[in-house]
Image (tube, rainbow, N blue to C red):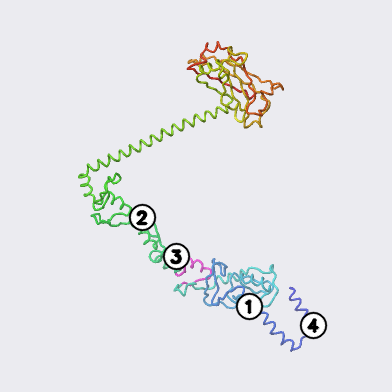
Amino acid sequence: MSSANTEESANDNKAKPTSATKQSDAPSEANLKSKLIQKVMTARQDSNTSGSKVGDGQNGSSGPDVKIFYIPPPGDKFKCVACGDILRQPVKFEICGHSCCSTCYSDIMTTTGRCPEDESVLERNEVTVDKQMRRELDHLGVKCSYFEQGCPWTGLAIELQDHLEECQHRVVTCIYDCGVEFEVRFMEQHVTADCPRRPVVCQFCQEKIEIHDQPAHMETCKRFPIPCPNGCKRKELPREELVVHLERECPLQVNNCPFTEHGCNFRGMKREIRAHLQDENILHVLLLRDAVQGFHNLLDLQIQAVRENQTTVKKLQMKLQRCEAFFEPSFIWRIDGYKEKFDEAQQGRKTTLFSSPFYSHRHGYRVCLSICPNGEQRFRGKYLSVFLCICRGEYDALLSWPFSFPITLKLLDQNINPDLRQDHQVTIRPNPIPSNNAYLKRPSSERNQCFGSPRFLELEQLHLRDFVVDNTIFFKIIFDISG
């Protein structure tokens, strides 16, 4: 027995209340029942009075609501104790035997938790699906939910859903999303004649468009027929062909003379232009002559510009080669007018020649070559002397001091046959001892003292090979920066 019934039995054993007490309690119980039903009805917000609703074919489904009109109206046995409407998906309270809609049951459990009929306390595990009630409801007589629209169908409640799927009086929404609702029986009329968004095929370009877009489409349709604006014999032609028609076909179209770009200002219709071309052929030839001359002048200017650019490119290439030479681990020094320079040295006017400074390698030592064509001091008149000077450079702070890299000095053989050339060379290996600091230290002035080979080549051997050709000699220095 439930706790509620136990409490009632215990109360029966107590002293009987007076009649005054009974009169005061009776309105309280009635008010409580009324409030319970009101809470459920408020939560449901359902105002059905003439029948129940159905969705998926089962009486009282919670699917899309469609009214059910029973014939004749069911008795109180089939009414929900909560909402008073015909039961929908009924559930049964085992504790008291009353039934309610499944949705009403959810509302009851979230509000009072009591049966609206007798206030029994409800437990979730004591509520079951009322299958017997559902079977009885399914076999009650009903008429079509759209009988007010004129549908004459009647049958069992269990058959209603199948009928509604085919009912011609059922209200549906337009399949083309125009927002209009109508009965199924009017579907064909709406989608073929009334719907403003129904698809149609343009009779000219065969493009599929919506009917309400048809006026705007005709304003731009490429195949829409339009008349020639000049009123020629071609009455109508597709819009996309109009430009070609006016340019090439229409005899009434006013066009420019074909020689307009060369200076002819004549305009006229096709027959006028043909006559103009015959009458003014000399003028057109003169215009073409001037145009050709203009093209020649322009071509001359472009040729001149190309030549100037080529000259500039050559100068830049030479400058680049010189710059690269400064940073290569080898350097070639060309000395022109060697005979005159030798004579000056022999006469004592200019005994030493210096090259432009260059770098041993990128970010390396800054050096220069020097030669004494007639020999240095005690070797004067006997030897060609060649020396190297270490100059102050930009990267000295990053280099190793004193200078100690082997260098090779070469006098290049200029024989016309490369296979017969025999260069003369001397390799110098600096000895970084304190006594050589004046030559090998990091420069504190513009350059250190020169070191090298005072007896580089005997003067008598200078002309035994092709060391001097066209009064020019070449010296090459190679740095072994790896060692």
Which residue shows up at 36% across the image and 55% down it? 206
Q: Is residue 424 above or below residue 110?
A: above
Q: Which residue is mark 4?
A: 14
Element under label 1? helix
Give the number of marks: 4
Q: Is residue 52 left or right of residue 249?
A: right
- CA distance for labels 2 and 3: 23 Å
Q: Which residue is mark 1?
A: 38
Q: Which residues are magenta?
A: 153-180
Residue 165 in magenta stretch: yes
Label 3 vs 1, first from the N-terminus: 1
- Which quadrant holds residue 305? top left
Element under label 2? loop
Residue 427 in magenta stretch: no
- CA distance for labels 3 and 1: 41 Å
- The type of residue carrying mark 4 is Lys
